[in-house]
Amino acid sequence: MPEADKEGERYQAGVPQAAPGFFLKGCHQLDWGMKNRLARTFNPASGRTVMLAIDHGYFQGPTSGLERIDLSILPLLPQCDALFCTRGVLRSMVPADSLKPMVLRASGGPSILREELSDEQIAMDMDDAVRLNAAGVGIQVFIGGEFETQSVHNMTRLVDQGIRAGIPTLGVTAVGKNMTRDARYFRLATRICAELGAHFVKTYYVEEGFETVTASCPVPIVMAGGKKLPERDALTMAYRAVSEGAAGVDMGRNIFQSDAPVAMIRAVGAVVHQLMKPEQAYDLYQTLRRDEQRGRRVAV
């Protein structure tokens, strides 16, 4: 994999990328509709977003925490900046009077029962995203996977369709079961997504070199929450990610599988938008958790 002569030294992570006239890097020359949708997804005051990812069912079915979206997820809507979901869930579960921006999962194919997950296709039409007033569409890109080229072409076709409709595309860097998760890989995967037209990119956090991933990607990166972690660890990961250049997070299991999901998403929001330190955010979570659990007892 090609690299600079002195790895890390040429990324200049401490030098922000200029974005004259708009608050998100790499997006200042987009059409008005694109920028308007991105300004709904990302908070213009902080320049960051807390996206709530609940699209897991498109290949996992009713995974833990998503058995009853009406009971587990709808109470979280007021606390997120955007919801990342499927069109089926949006139509069947999300109230039409919700003002939250919706980013729609646009790829699908194999289920969790299949060994090879990279054989995905575009699974919705952009006209439907327009009908649903989507703020964006998201698609998996399997760099290094068996169906890498197919997934890249899926993304570029979606980008073209989105540009015609004024809807931004989120490139999601998918990691296979046996693939290395390090900064070198994510620099490659995120850069390919951006180079081929993704307007923002979702990727995983790595403890070493994440700032080089965000610095070398010319469009905003949101951090994927990944597997469920202890709340303190998840808040620490979110803090490190935004401190190292991420434009927010797209968390799912670390929120809806928490013992106190409302408390957790509020604590994550404090980290992302206020850069609250992890220890303070965990204390906030504990306080809100007690209030949340007390409210449940009163309701019962």
Image: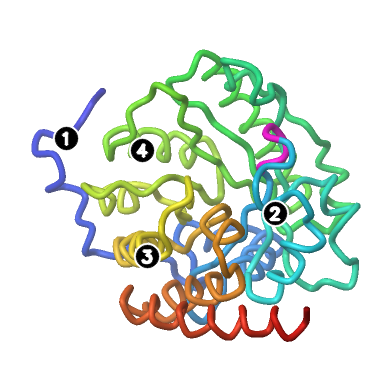
Q: Nearer the viewer, mark 1 or mark 3?
A: 3
Q: What residue is shown with label 2?
A: 103
- Which sits in the foreground, 114 or 289? 289
Q: Is residue 59 magenta?
A: yes
The quadrant of the rendering that contains the C terminus is bottom right
Residue designated by label 3? 242
Residue 62 locus on image (x, y percent)? 73, 42
**Which residue is found at the position 84% from the left and 61% from the top?**
94
Q: Is residue 154 above or below residue 74?
A: above
- Residue beneath disc 1: 4
Predominant SS of the magenta segment: helix
* Circles 4, 3 touching at the beta carbon (< 8 Å): no
Q: In 3D space, how far apart are the residues under numbered discs 3 and 2 (Cα atoms)?
A: 20 Å
Is residue 143 depicted above or below 21 in this figure?
above
At 73% across and 59% down in the image, what residue appears? 102
The disc at residue 186 is: 4
| Percent coordinates x, y for residue 42 in the rendering | 57, 68
How far apart are the two marked residues, 1 and 2, measured between alpha carbons?
Answer: 35 Å
**Crowd around label 4: few <14 · some 14–19 · many ≥20 (10 Å):** many
Query: Where residue 278 is drawn, which disc sits there?
Result: none
Q: Amino acid at mark 1?
A: Ala
Looking at the rendered structure, the kind of residue marked 4 is Phe
User: Residue reaching furthest left?
Assistant: 6
Label 2 is placed on what type of residue? Answer: Val
